[in-house]
Amino acid sequence: MNSSVDTVLAPSVTARLSGALRRWYTQYHHPLSWTGFVIFAALLAFSWLGPLVYHSSPFAIHALHTLSAPSARFPFGTDNLGRDMLARMMAGGQATLQVGLLGSLLAMTAGIVYGMLSAMSPGWLDKSLMRLLDAILAMPTLVLMIFFAAIIPLDTLSLVLLLGLVSWPGLARIVRNEALAYRERDYILAARQFGAGRFYIARAHMLRAMLPILIVNATFMVADVILALAGLSFLGLGIQPPRASWGGLLNEGVQQVFLGAWWLIVYPGLAIFAAIVAMNLIGQGLLARLEGR
Protein backbone atom coordinates (compact mmCIF):
# COMPACT_ATOMS: atom_id res chain seq x y z
CA MET A 1 0.00 0.00 0.00
CA ASN A 2 2.71 2.46 1.00
CA SER A 3 4.83 1.65 -2.03
CA SER A 4 1.90 2.32 -4.37
CA VAL A 5 1.22 5.65 -2.65
CA ASP A 6 4.90 6.60 -2.94
CA THR A 7 4.83 5.67 -6.61
CA VAL A 8 1.87 7.95 -7.17
CA LEU A 9 3.23 10.84 -5.10
CA ALA A 10 6.82 10.83 -6.40
CA PRO A 11 5.98 11.79 -10.01
CA SER A 12 3.59 14.44 -8.69
CA VAL A 13 6.28 16.06 -6.55
CA THR A 14 8.79 15.82 -9.38
CA ALA A 15 6.30 17.32 -11.83
CA ARG A 16 5.56 20.24 -9.52
CA LEU A 17 9.26 20.90 -8.97
CA SER A 18 10.07 20.76 -12.67
CA GLY A 19 7.09 22.96 -13.41
CA ALA A 20 8.27 25.56 -10.90
CA LEU A 21 11.78 25.51 -12.39
CA ARG A 22 10.35 25.95 -15.89
CA ARG A 23 8.22 28.89 -14.76
CA TRP A 24 11.22 30.47 -13.03
CA TYR A 25 13.37 29.98 -16.14
CA THR A 26 10.70 31.41 -18.44
CA GLN A 27 10.12 34.44 -16.24
CA TYR A 28 13.65 35.36 -15.23
CA HIS A 29 16.13 33.87 -17.71
CA HIS A 30 18.23 36.46 -19.53
CA PRO A 31 21.58 36.21 -21.34
CA LEU A 32 23.20 38.62 -18.87
CA SER A 33 22.01 36.59 -15.89
CA TRP A 34 23.23 33.30 -17.29
CA THR A 35 26.59 34.83 -18.17
CA GLY A 36 26.91 36.07 -14.59
CA PHE A 37 25.84 32.70 -13.18
CA VAL A 38 28.47 30.90 -15.25
CA ILE A 39 31.25 33.28 -14.17
CA PHE A 40 30.29 33.12 -10.50
CA ALA A 41 29.89 29.34 -10.60
CA ALA A 42 33.38 29.13 -12.13
CA LEU A 43 34.76 31.24 -9.25
CA LEU A 44 33.04 29.01 -6.69
CA ALA A 45 34.37 25.88 -8.37
CA PHE A 46 37.87 27.38 -8.56
CA SER A 47 37.85 28.26 -4.85
CA TRP A 48 36.28 25.13 -3.36
CA LEU A 49 36.81 22.37 -5.91
CA GLY A 50 40.21 23.54 -7.09
CA PRO A 51 42.05 22.42 -3.91
CA LEU A 52 40.66 18.91 -4.43
CA VAL A 53 42.55 18.75 -7.71
CA TYR A 54 45.55 20.99 -7.05
CA HIS A 55 47.20 19.63 -3.90
CA SER A 56 49.42 22.45 -2.69
CA SER A 57 49.42 24.25 0.63
CA PRO A 58 48.84 28.02 0.53
CA PHE A 59 51.16 28.36 3.54
CA ALA A 60 54.11 26.23 2.37
CA ILE A 61 57.25 28.27 1.71
CA HIS A 62 59.50 27.32 -1.22
CA ALA A 63 62.63 29.26 -0.30
CA LEU A 64 64.38 28.53 -3.60
CA HIS A 65 61.47 29.80 -5.70
CA THR A 66 60.70 33.27 -4.37
CA LEU A 67 58.98 35.56 -6.87
CA SER A 68 59.00 32.85 -9.53
CA ALA A 69 57.06 33.70 -12.67
CA PRO A 70 54.15 31.42 -13.70
CA SER A 71 55.48 28.05 -14.81
CA ALA A 72 54.47 24.41 -15.08
CA ARG A 73 55.33 23.83 -11.42
CA PHE A 74 53.70 27.06 -10.19
CA PRO A 75 50.96 27.99 -12.70
CA PHE A 76 50.28 31.36 -11.01
CA GLY A 77 53.87 31.91 -9.86
CA THR A 78 55.03 32.46 -6.28
CA ASP A 79 55.11 35.44 -3.93
CA ASN A 80 58.07 37.07 -2.18
CA LEU A 81 58.15 34.25 0.40
CA GLY A 82 57.96 31.48 -2.18
CA ARG A 83 54.33 30.54 -1.51
CA ASP A 84 52.31 29.05 -4.33
CA MET A 85 50.05 31.81 -5.70
CA LEU A 86 47.54 29.39 -7.24
CA ALA A 87 46.97 27.72 -3.87
CA ARG A 88 46.73 31.12 -2.19
CA MET A 89 44.27 32.33 -4.82
CA MET A 90 42.03 29.34 -4.08
CA ALA A 91 42.24 29.91 -0.32
CA GLY A 92 41.69 33.64 -0.84
CA GLY A 93 38.65 32.92 -2.97
CA GLN A 94 37.11 30.85 -0.20
CA ALA A 95 37.57 33.65 2.34
CA THR A 96 36.43 36.43 -0.02
CA LEU A 97 33.34 34.68 -1.35
CA GLN A 98 32.38 33.37 2.08
CA VAL A 99 32.49 36.85 3.60
CA GLY A 100 30.74 38.32 0.57
CA LEU A 101 27.85 35.85 0.58
CA LEU A 102 27.36 35.68 4.36
CA GLY A 103 27.78 39.44 4.80
CA SER A 104 25.18 40.17 2.13
CA LEU A 105 22.83 37.60 3.69
CA LEU A 106 23.14 39.35 7.05
CA ALA A 107 22.59 42.75 5.43
CA MET A 108 19.54 41.47 3.53
CA THR A 109 18.04 40.04 6.71
CA ALA A 110 18.63 43.21 8.73
CA GLY A 111 17.34 45.46 5.93
CA ILE A 112 14.18 43.41 5.38
CA VAL A 113 13.37 43.19 9.10
CA TYR A 114 13.97 46.90 9.71
CA GLY A 115 12.09 48.02 6.58
CA MET A 116 9.09 45.80 7.23
CA LEU A 117 9.00 46.78 10.92
CA SER A 118 8.96 50.44 9.97
CA ALA A 119 6.27 50.01 7.30
CA MET A 120 3.96 47.95 9.49
CA SER A 121 4.36 50.13 12.61
CA PRO A 122 2.14 53.02 13.71
CA GLY A 123 2.92 56.39 12.13
CA TRP A 124 4.90 57.81 15.05
CA LEU A 125 7.16 54.75 15.25
CA ASP A 126 7.61 54.67 11.46
CA LYS A 127 8.77 58.30 11.49
CA SER A 128 11.15 57.65 14.40
CA LEU A 129 12.69 54.63 12.68
CA MET A 130 13.09 56.60 9.44
CA ARG A 131 14.82 59.51 11.20
CA LEU A 132 17.18 56.99 12.81
CA LEU A 133 17.80 55.44 9.40
CA ASP A 134 18.52 58.89 7.91
CA ALA A 135 21.10 59.46 10.63
CA ILE A 136 22.74 56.11 9.89
CA LEU A 137 22.77 56.79 6.14
CA ALA A 138 24.39 60.18 6.76
CA MET A 139 27.43 58.48 8.29
CA PRO A 140 30.30 57.82 5.84
CA THR A 141 30.33 54.05 5.34
CA LEU A 142 34.03 53.79 4.47
CA VAL A 143 35.06 55.70 7.57
CA LEU A 144 32.82 53.51 9.73
CA MET A 145 34.29 50.33 8.25
CA ILE A 146 37.86 51.52 8.76
CA PHE A 147 37.09 52.63 12.33
CA PHE A 148 35.52 49.35 13.43
CA ALA A 149 38.02 47.23 11.49
CA ALA A 150 40.82 49.00 13.36
CA ILE A 151 39.43 48.26 16.85
CA ILE A 152 37.97 44.74 16.60
CA PRO A 153 39.77 41.43 16.05
CA LEU A 154 39.79 40.71 12.33
CA ASP A 155 38.56 37.25 11.40
CA THR A 156 35.92 35.87 9.07
CA LEU A 157 33.08 36.21 11.59
CA SER A 158 33.90 39.78 12.57
CA LEU A 159 34.22 40.84 8.92
CA VAL A 160 30.88 39.24 8.08
CA LEU A 161 29.27 41.13 10.96
CA LEU A 162 31.03 44.39 10.12
CA LEU A 163 30.24 44.39 6.40
CA GLY A 164 26.73 43.08 6.94
CA LEU A 165 25.85 45.66 9.56
CA VAL A 166 27.06 48.63 7.48
CA SER A 167 25.38 47.49 4.25
CA TRP A 168 21.71 47.14 5.25
CA PRO A 169 20.37 50.75 5.59
CA GLY A 170 19.85 51.34 1.87
CA LEU A 171 17.90 48.12 1.48
CA ALA A 172 15.80 48.93 4.56
CA ARG A 173 14.57 52.12 2.90
CA ILE A 174 13.72 50.25 -0.31
CA VAL A 175 11.79 47.57 1.61
CA ARG A 176 9.92 50.16 3.66
CA ASN A 177 8.87 52.15 0.57
CA GLU A 178 7.76 49.02 -1.27
CA ALA A 179 5.82 47.79 1.75
CA LEU A 180 4.02 51.13 2.06
CA ALA A 181 3.03 50.88 -1.60
CA TYR A 182 1.69 47.34 -1.15
CA ARG A 183 -0.04 48.09 2.15
CA GLU A 184 -3.02 49.75 0.49
CA ARG A 185 -3.55 47.12 -2.21
CA ASP A 186 -7.01 45.54 -2.33
CA TYR A 187 -5.83 42.04 -1.45
CA ILE A 188 -3.94 43.36 1.59
CA LEU A 189 -7.03 45.23 2.77
CA ALA A 190 -9.11 42.09 2.19
CA ALA A 191 -6.66 40.01 4.25
CA ARG A 192 -7.02 42.51 7.10
CA GLN A 193 -10.80 42.31 6.89
CA PHE A 194 -10.58 38.53 7.28
CA GLY A 195 -8.52 38.97 10.45
CA ALA A 196 -4.99 38.34 9.13
CA GLY A 197 -2.30 39.68 11.45
CA ARG A 198 0.46 42.08 10.47
CA PHE A 199 3.16 39.43 10.62
CA TYR A 200 1.19 37.08 8.39
CA ILE A 201 0.43 39.86 5.88
CA ALA A 202 4.09 40.92 5.78
CA ARG A 203 5.35 37.35 5.35
CA ALA A 204 2.71 35.81 3.11
CA HIS A 205 1.77 38.77 0.93
CA MET A 206 4.21 41.65 0.98
CA LEU A 207 7.50 39.75 1.04
CA ARG A 208 6.25 37.35 -1.59
CA ALA A 209 5.31 40.28 -3.84
CA MET A 210 8.68 41.96 -3.21
CA LEU A 211 10.71 38.79 -3.78
CA PRO A 212 11.92 39.69 -7.32
CA ILE A 213 13.10 43.12 -6.17
CA LEU A 214 14.82 41.58 -3.15
CA ILE A 215 16.62 39.02 -5.31
CA VAL A 216 17.91 41.73 -7.64
CA ASN A 217 19.13 43.83 -4.72
CA ALA A 218 20.76 40.77 -3.16
CA THR A 219 22.96 40.25 -6.23
CA PHE A 220 24.10 43.86 -6.17
CA MET A 221 24.72 43.65 -2.43
CA VAL A 222 27.00 40.62 -2.83
CA ALA A 223 29.08 42.62 -5.29
CA ASP A 224 29.17 45.62 -2.93
CA VAL A 225 30.27 43.50 0.04
CA ILE A 226 33.00 41.77 -1.99
CA LEU A 227 34.25 45.17 -3.17
CA ALA A 228 34.15 46.55 0.38
CA LEU A 229 36.11 43.55 1.67
CA ALA A 230 38.66 43.99 -1.11
CA GLY A 231 39.02 47.64 -0.16
CA LEU A 232 39.54 46.84 3.53
CA SER A 233 42.00 44.06 2.67
CA PHE A 234 43.88 46.40 0.35
CA LEU A 235 44.24 48.78 3.30
CA GLY A 236 45.48 45.93 5.50
CA LEU A 237 42.25 45.75 7.53
CA GLY A 238 40.71 42.63 6.03
CA ILE A 239 41.63 38.95 6.34
CA GLN A 240 44.92 38.95 8.20
CA PRO A 241 48.09 37.09 7.10
CA PRO A 242 49.02 34.33 6.82
CA ARG A 243 45.43 33.70 5.67
CA ALA A 244 44.73 34.96 2.19
CA SER A 245 41.99 36.99 0.55
CA TRP A 246 41.91 38.41 -2.95
CA GLY A 247 42.14 41.97 -1.65
CA GLY A 248 44.99 41.05 0.67
CA LEU A 249 46.87 39.33 -2.16
CA LEU A 250 46.39 42.43 -4.30
CA ASN A 251 47.82 44.57 -1.50
CA GLU A 252 50.84 42.29 -1.17
CA GLY A 253 51.31 42.30 -4.94
CA VAL A 254 51.33 46.09 -5.18
CA GLN A 255 54.23 46.17 -2.75
CA GLN A 256 56.22 43.82 -5.02
CA VAL A 257 55.18 45.11 -8.43
CA PHE A 258 58.30 47.30 -8.74
CA LEU A 259 60.28 44.05 -8.88
CA GLY A 260 58.42 43.05 -12.03
CA ALA A 261 56.17 40.46 -10.32
CA TRP A 262 53.12 41.33 -12.43
CA TRP A 263 51.36 38.04 -11.59
CA LEU A 264 50.96 39.10 -7.96
CA ILE A 265 48.45 41.81 -8.94
CA VAL A 266 46.98 40.48 -12.18
CA TYR A 267 45.38 37.30 -10.82
CA PRO A 268 43.85 38.77 -7.62
CA GLY A 269 42.68 41.82 -9.57
CA LEU A 270 41.04 39.68 -12.24
CA ALA A 271 39.34 37.52 -9.61
CA ILE A 272 37.85 40.54 -7.80
CA PHE A 273 36.81 42.06 -11.11
CA ALA A 274 35.20 38.80 -12.26
CA ALA A 275 33.24 38.36 -9.02
CA ILE A 276 31.86 41.90 -9.11
CA VAL A 277 31.04 41.73 -12.82
CA ALA A 278 29.33 38.35 -12.36
CA MET A 279 27.01 39.56 -9.64
CA ASN A 280 26.22 42.77 -11.50
CA LEU A 281 25.43 40.81 -14.67
CA ILE A 282 23.07 38.59 -12.69
CA GLY A 283 21.39 41.62 -11.17
CA GLN A 284 21.15 43.51 -14.46
CA GLY A 285 19.69 40.48 -16.22
CA LEU A 286 17.07 39.93 -13.52
CA LEU A 287 16.24 43.64 -13.51
CA ALA A 288 15.84 43.62 -17.28
CA ARG A 289 13.41 40.71 -17.08
CA LEU A 290 11.41 42.41 -14.33
CA GLU A 291 11.13 45.53 -16.51
CA GLY A 292 10.07 43.43 -19.50
CA ARG A 293 13.19 44.02 -21.57
Image: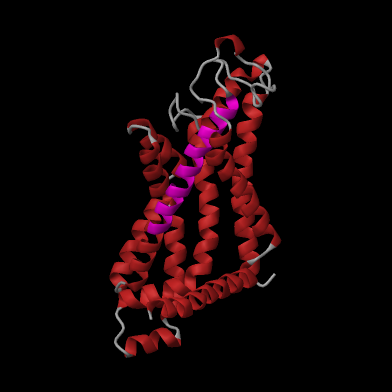
- Give whichever of 131, 187 is nearer the camera: 187
- 246, above or below 132, in the image: above
Closer to the camera in the image, 2 or 24? 2
Residue 63 place in picture, x, y as percent: 55, 10
Left/right placement of residue 73 relative to residue 208 reads: right
Lateral position of residue 138 relative to residue 63, left or right: left
Instruction: Tell me what residue is drawn at x 34 percent, y 57 percent.
Output: 132
Magenta residues (range): 85-109
**233, above or below 112, in the image:** above
Quarter holding the C terminus? Answer: bottom right
The quarter in which the N terminus is drawn is bottom left
Colouring scheme applied when the structure was drawn:
secondary structure
Q: Is residue 208 magenta?
A: no
Reply above or below: 96 against 215.
above
Name the spot of residue 138 as percent of width and height, x first. 42, 50
Q: Quadrant of residue 27?
A: bottom right
- What residue sits 60% from the left and 20% below the top? 78
Q: Is the magenta region chiefly helix, strand or loop?
A: helix
Q: Is residue 279 left or right of residue 206?
A: right
Residue 259 rendering spot, x and y as whole percentages: 66, 14
Residue 39 position within the rendered picture, expressed as x and y whole percent measured from the top left:
64, 48
User: Can the viewer see residue 290 in this picture?
Assistant: no
> Is-magenta flag for residue 108?
yes
Q: Is residue 42 left or right of residue 163?
A: right
Residue at figure coordinates x 53%, y 47% from the top left: 224
The number of discs equals: 0
Image vertical order of residue 230 relative to residue 69, above or below? below
Q: Is residue 285 visible?
A: yes
